[in-house]
Image (tube, grey):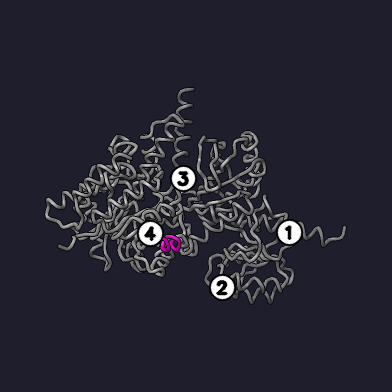
Amino acid sequence: MEKLRRSETLELRAMVGIDPQSDGLARARSYGIEATHEGIDWLLANRDGIRIAFEATSARIHARHAPMLRDAGLVAVDLTPAAVGPAVVPPVNLRQHLDEPNVNLVTCGGQATVPIVAAVSRVTDVPYAEIVSTVASRSAGPGTRQNIDEFTQRTARALETIGGARVGKAIIILNPAEPPILMRNTVYCALPEDADREAVADSIVEMVAEVATYVPGYRLKSPPVFEEGPFRTPAGEVPTRVIARAPGAGAGDTLPRAAGHLDIMTASAVRVAETLAAERLREEVPA
Amino acid sequence: MTAAFRLTDTTLRDGSHALSHRYTEEQVRAIARALDAAGVPVIELSHGDGLGGSSFNYGFSARDERALLRAAAEEVRRAKLAVLLLPGIGVAEDLKVVRDIGATVARIATHCTEADIAEQHIGMAKQLGMEAVGFLMMSHMVEPAKLLEQAKLMESYGADCVYVVDSAGALTIPQARERVRALRDGLDCEVGFHAHNNLSLAVANSLAAIEEGATQIDGCLCGLGAGAGNCPIEILAAVCDRLGIPTGVDHFALMDAAEEVVRPIMPRPQVIDRAALLLGYAGVYSSFLLHAERAAERYGVPAHEILVELGRRKVVGGQEDMIVDVAVELAGARGRTEAG
């Protein structure tokens, strides 16, 4: 909500929930934004002038809502694991999916790491990529915890289909330390013999700067590190790997700083919607 | 005489850390055959970090763990085959594959405060007709009451046994005792104990656990395992024999297996050197040892400094990526000091 209020392209018209006691809805009202606890029924009845719906419910609920939103002519930006529409990672493949009625944000780990894998695969072959996301226990909700396989499998697939790795693997670790840790992400890419290291490092640095334009605080902990193998990856033996370490920091608007993984999701969602809005607006307004 | 506890050998799983996950089919066959012949009732086999652990972060296996499991399955006549799975690293689907190969015991491991991420996997194990064992790692990091709360979650998902796992080899004898007792008093299912020898207490803690009512105990031939290794089963069995505790295994056969089958393939003796001792003292995940040594060499900083720093940061099992982080930072700090 805070990010949408700051957006120059989007206007936040309403917050739709189901809990009359919700803090989020109360906060929306205090900003003078329309807020309802009457769920999707309210939205469908009051959709005039609304073009984009951000859905952060659950996979099951979004699967039910998706056709309703589509029939109502609303574009759905899906933050759940429902994956009704194609998975998008803004700097990598959003441009290919601007006409979709529904786009999915993969996972927080995917938003934090797929751009780095894509940065490597645009300058050299990536036979295998692996990411490790460590998040504070307190910030991982029951949905994530009860279906942790969904996180690893969906993220791994995105490393392949969007990141451009031939084989992807994702690992998630929950750390219960107090005070809660910041989300951290480590990306490993297998590199072939002939990889141009300077080009790989430059490409990663450039991509991180691009992500940082919409995820404030996203940065490399240090320049990419190259290590000598050989490494016997599932996609064959490679001589070298590159390691990039990026905390998934965000603006930390109302979420605790530790919930950087949620922050990167909302930041990516806003970037997706801003891009869609700009694109469709351009088409609809005659020159 | 009925055994006082069920011994689970994990030479082919935890021991795989000591070999940097480079077991061959031939080695697996020889070890599985020897354990089975000695009457060891459960043999655990997988990558050291569980199914799907073969990775940059934890080290790639030389051979596919499924091929190794098949080799073991062909050798054993009496023993049950077990696998380890860490949710977040492996997935529930992996259990189907290993069940079809012949594994009948699924050990599902989480950090000691994160039991609820195991619901899916314990459920899958039960659905597949496997025995499900909950594995609460780094048990030294929480008080007994908290550990019991987490163990009860695992029991509620269907676990047939919940283990107190001393992943850092950090528990003293009274601490091991009170954790096993808390679980024994508070659970209806069985309680197990998994030791590491970083403080030289693996056998002593295992004996204390048996006294407190643990009915499943882990160990390895020659103590082969992460850090200073696990509880050496040939020693545990010999001590139990002297104490009159029935084990159901042939301790002389285990001594032979340790000496003749495992010792010749060990890359180095399983000793408690400074770095291993510091794992136990600082409460750091034992598997970090060899990774820290490699990072130490790469970045020119002492391994024990890396390990102590990891302990200070309260890093948990699975966060092997932090080792490079800390090594790079320590190397940077040294560079600055030298330059300044």
Give the mark nearest the N terminus, 3 or 4: 3
Q: Residue shown at 26%/64% (left/top)?
A: B190
User: Can you identify the residue that label 4 sits on?
Assistant: B108
Is A283 placed left or right of A249 in the picture?
Answer: right
The quarter of the rendered structure image containing the C terminus of chain A is bottom right
Magenta part of the protein: which range? B95-101
Q: Amino acid at mark 2?
A: Ile
Q: Position of residue B169 (x, y in %)?
A: 29, 46
Side (left or right) of B222 relative to A274: left
Which chain contains the residue that carries disc 3? Answer: B
Marks 1 and 3: same chain?
no
Q: Secondary structure under badge 2? A: loop
Task: Have a look at marks 2 and 4 and say if they share a chain.
Answer: no
- Residue A26: x and y in percent read 56, 67
Query: Which-is-in-front pick, marks 3 and 2?
Result: 3
Q: Are marks 2 and 4 in contact (CB under 8 Å)?
A: no
Instruction: Say which of B120 and A12 sits in front.
Output: B120
Residue drawn 36% across the image and 35% down it = B304
Examine the residues drawn in magenta and state their main secondary structure.
Answer: helix
Which residue, given by chain and number where applicable, does mark 2 sit on?
A18
Name the mark nearer the viewer: 1 or 3: 3
Q: Amino acid at mark 1?
A: Leu
Query: Which residue position holds label 1?
Result: A98
Query: Could you tell me how far apart the alpha carbons at marks 4 and 1 are, in whole angstroms?
Result: 42 Å
Say what amino acid the circle numbered 3 marks.
Phe
Circle 1 marks a residue in which chain?
A
